[in-house]
Amino acid sequence: MSLMLTTKRGTSKKMIEKINFNWAGNTYKEYQANNTASIILQKRNRTVVTSARGTSMKYLENTSIPEQSKTKLAYITTNRGTKRRLIKIN
């Protein structure tokens, strides 16, 4: 028995030949473990994050701790431009 499955917000269709109607207990746990294992093996170095109802995609790079930048000093004017104050910007 085959099944026409609609995917990707209704814009794509996929034909499925093998259908398993048992979605309870250990059978589903085995299916889920096999499915997640196959996804992890196919995973690329970059991870895709979708946002805005699936209309935009962002690629995440390997996250690393950013280096601490040096503290910068800057002057701001106060009191209608009559005084200057030195502030630290991280």
Image: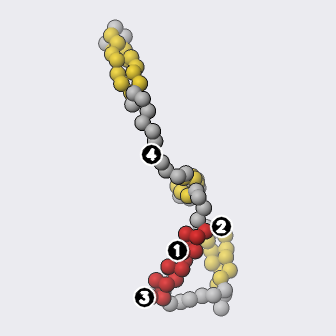
Q: Which residue is mark 2?
A: 11
Q: Nearer the viewer, residue 66 or 4?
A: 66
Structural distance between the alpha carbons of marks 3 and 1: 17 Å
| The image quarter in which residue 73 lies | top left
Q: In this view of the protein, can residue 80 be seen by the observer? A: no
Q: In the rendering, at what x and y percent does residue 15 appear?
A: 68, 80
Marking on residue 25: 3
Q: Disc number at residue 86? A: none
Amino acid carrying label 3: it is Gly
Q: Secondary structure at mark 1?
A: helix
* Callout 4–callout 3 Cβ contact below 8 Å: no
The answer for how far apart the CA atoms under marks 4 and 3 are is 42 Å
Q: Which of marks 3 and 4 precedes in the sequence?
A: 3
Q: Left of 79 or right of it: where is 44? A: right
Q: CA distance from mark 3 to mark 2?
A: 32 Å
1 on left or right of 22:
right
SS at mark 2 in the image: loop
Name which residue lies at 62% across and 74% down: 6
Tag on residue 36?
A: 1
Which residue is labeled 4 in the image?
65
Disc 1 marks which amino acid?
Thr
